[in-house]
Amino acid sequence: MDPTPTPAPTPPMGWMSWPCLGAEPSEGRVRAVAAHFAESGLRDAGYRQLVIEGDWQAQQRAADGRLQADPRLFPHGLGELAAHLHEHGFGLGLSASAGERTCGGRPGSFGHEAADAAAFAAWGVDLLSYDYCHGPDDLGEAMARYTAMGAALRACGRPITYAICDWGLRAPWLWARRAGAQMWRTAHDLLPVWDSPRNARAGVGVLMALERISGLERHAGPGGWNDPHVLLLGVEQGGARLSVNECRAQFGMWCLLAAPLMLACDPRHLVGELLDLAGNAEAIAIDQDPLGRPATCLARSGALSIWSRPLAGDLVAVGVLNSGDQPAEVVVDLAQLGFAPLQPVHMRDVWTRRTREDALVRVPVAVGPRDLRLFTMQQSGSPGAR
């Protein structure tokens, strides 16, 4: 029997460093992010896994083959950084590569899986994001490399959440669980744009990420999650950034789809509406619901779509997404959501935190351009009704 508990019973939450720190993370910058998350309430909202991407490794392995951190960026070592984060209620995540080299040309883990997993465990790492830079295109070889690291992590003596990042190119949702992973990317890296060309390979927008994950719901559940990449709240690249409406739509859809909630911005940019959005406890509760069943699309007409997700306690989360550029209205049929006819339904607006007590058959919902209305609903008189 595996002596360690299964990681990721609910989608991981935290922060990915690349959009904020790029290729040069450092212990000082990561400590500063942790301090801001603690002070702003983001840690207590659930964002606890701080994942260091980029060139954290030294240029070469040690003489005995051990993986080592860049001493210029991490002069006190990753073990001390992990201990500091653990002391303050965070976990430490790292990126690595299934190739001989990382994306930035630092040492990869191919052929060193057992030794590197042991190093991660010794340092106190809690999450590994394992990409595929400089790996061969062959599917069988990719699966073998990812499986080798999965086996090494299971044998390392520490529960480490394993995230497969092949950018969705080899349909990892079909095999990632067997390789030992708890989350797997479904698309390329996200850019802070609403839409993107269909053939984009260097990055995709929110709508393309949603298109790539749509239909994959049956592959996700406790212990294994579809990952459409980071939350774009507060992220700016090349002058591009999402509007508040677009951020609300992305955040709400990620919660409906049971996706990992990984922030990626400089946390100093999360203020006002964006900070309130990131910390919305009712939306986060949808994402973290213990049933772990992602939403499915019930209806679609033009730019409007209606999504439904069953929750514990006889609750249902419902999202109405308007992907277009004009305000719109749709009528939500409560019977289509599984509610008994002519029995009142409690309808809670997650964004405004207001409850309507008397919804019966059909409910008109107005939604702004590039925005999402998000509700939790419950039949009056159900066992879990409040």
Image (cartoon, rainbow, N blue to C red):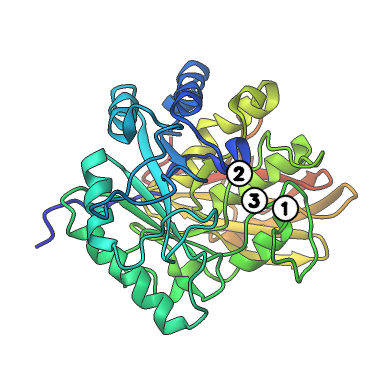
SS under mark 3:
strand
* Three-letter amino acid code at the position of disc 2: Leu
Q: Residue at x 72, y 52 (%)?
A: 321
Q: Where residue 205 sits: x, y (%)?
A: 73, 55
| Distance (Cα) linking label 1 and label 3 | 6 Å
Q: Nearer the viewer, mark 1 or mark 2?
A: 2
Q: Residue at x 41, y 44 (%)?
A: 58
Look at the picture and state if 248 lies above or below 41: below
Residue 153 visible, this orientation? yes
Q: Quadrant of residue 49?
A: top left
Label 2, residues with CA under 10 Å away: few <14, some 14-19, many ≥20: many
Nearest the eye: 231 or 347: 231
Outermost residue, front direction? Answer: 63
Residue matched to label 2: 231
Q: Where residue 112 sits: x, y (%)?
A: 29, 62
* Horizontal arrangement in the rendering, residue 118 relative to residue 199 (left or right): left
Q: Residue at x 9, y 63 (%)?
A: 1
In the rendered image, the quadrant that contains the C terminus is top left
Nearest the eye: 183 or 125: 125
Nearest the eye: 31 or 366: 31
* Horizontal arrangement in the rendering, residue 353 relative to residue 273 (left or right): left
* Three-letter amino acid code at the position of disc 1: Leu
| Distance (Cα) linking label 2 and label 3 | 18 Å
* Three-letter amino acid code at the position of disc 3: Gly
Residue matched to label 3: 319
Residue matched to label 1: 321
Sequence-earlier tag: 1 or 2: 2
Mark 1 and mark 3 residues within 8 Å of each other at the beta carbon: yes
SS under mark 2:
loop
